[in-house]
Amino acid sequence: MSMRTHYTTQVKPEDEGREVTVAGWVHKIRDLGKLKFIVLRDRTGILQITLKKGCVEEGLISLAEKLREEDVISVTGAVKATKIAPGERELIPSRIEIISKTLDPVPVSVSGNIESNLDTRLDHRVLDLRRPEVAAVFRVQSKLLEGMQEYLWREGFQQVFTPCLMGAASESGAEVFPVVYFNKSAFLRQDPQLHRQLAVISGMDRIYDLGPSWRAELSHTPRHLCEHRGCAVEIGFIRDEYDVMRVEEELVRSGVAKVVSDCKEELEALGKELSVPKSPFPEIRFPDVYSILEEYGKKVPYGEDYDRESETILAKHVKEKHGSDFFFVNRFPFRVKPFYVMRLDDEPTWARSVDLVCKGLELSSGGQREHRYDKIIGQIKEKGMSMVGLKWFTEFFRYGAPPHGGFNIGIERLTMQLLDLQNVQEAALFPRTPERLLP
């Protein structure tokens, strides 16, 4: 039997006179002498509990005087409609049960009276997550993923689960976490992409994977995590990278639309207004990137990749010209991309490699993969990689592989950019960075 009959947001003004039971944490207490207010918080919102001398039992008044913030309580009482209470309703209690008392003063402010820096908040993350505006971030993130999955289901994509343990590094060994795997070495995956490609070659030509990836980068920036989550999509029988781009932009649009429709209170708590981005998203291609950057005084050598400053400049250009926060960068130089990307046959300097950028931050890398066995082998040799170490992947391309492509969009980064958070760690429930492994 549940300790509650209602969550706080399920209690409505039109329930006046109805007896309900709510349960949660003491968010705030206000003592006005003969009038006491307890603001109770649960995962959905808050509800004011009003105790007035002469209107409630004296024992309840005495009990309320012993409460302090973050005690866990259950309250049964009658609903009263009132214009002056949050949500225009309050509860007049007939019973208050103390479920759990706080043993020590709370080290970070949950009610928002005192602002703590991010490191302190993350040291006490469980308490930080009790703050309504912090909890709102993760309700938004949940709805974002729900909307993305709804799109994938509608379009016939099958969810799969690819391995997190790899027998060999999938890209560059410098950025992987080695782990002990019985009597041999293994690695935490950098990206589930290679196994997604193999799944497509097996005949599952529309798949997606939701899960973690790891990067062993000693990066101390507001946009990096050592462990992050992605929605990774792979599609078979495509014509070119533009089929992949159309799927990705609709995936994003569906996720944002779900947030806009279902997260009005959360967005209000965060002070954010969102709208569904228009499609198609603008596209910038190499080598045009170089001339655009030069217009803004940024010189990047022809055939080279751009840097973070360039990404910000391109975002400004797209915003001014197209009014869009989202845009694709396409046809990156092949020399800076992994062996598995497809080059342009007629212009092999460039690859069918695509980044999705939002407000100057890369959210995903993807595009069209090389599916022709001889081309893959040639590109592995050109990159100076081990043929033996990649045989587990390449050998299946000998037996008929359709044209395919995909992407892996970072969930924390997308959440961060949509909500204009200052640090991607704010969009991770328990973030992992070079210095942070606890809690």
Image: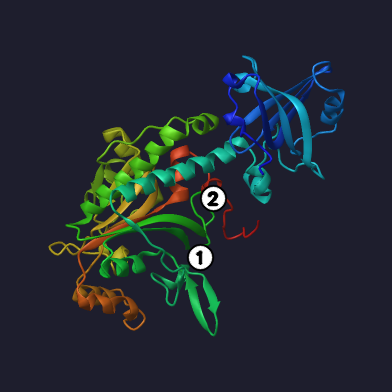
Give the position of the N terminus as an image quadrant: top right
Residue 111 location in percent, x, y? 68, 33
- Coordinates of residue 247 in the picture (x, y in percent): 28, 49
Viewer-nearest residue: 381 or 260: 260
Residue under the image location 49 percent in, 54 percent down:
224
- Residue 233 spot, x, y in % from top left: 33, 57
Image location (x, y in percent) of residue 211: 45, 59
Q: Quadrant of residue 43?
A: top right
Within 10 angstroms of label 2, few (less than 14), some, or many (20 or more) residues?
A: many
N-terminal-most mark, 1 or 2? 1
Quadrant in the rendering for residue 353: bottom left
Q: Alpha-carbon distance for marks 1 and 2?
A: 17 Å
434 left or right of 295 in image: right
Residue at x 52% of width, y 41% of height: 139
Q: Which numbered disc covers residue 428?
A: 2
Which of the two residues, 20 or 12, is positioned nearer the viewer here? 20
User: Residue lying furthest left in this view?
Assistant: 346
Whether residue 37 is visible here, answered yes or no, is yes
Above or below 267: residue 194: below
**Image quadrant occupied by the C terminus:** bottom right
Callout 2: helix, strand or loop? loop
**Residue pointed to by mark 1:** 216
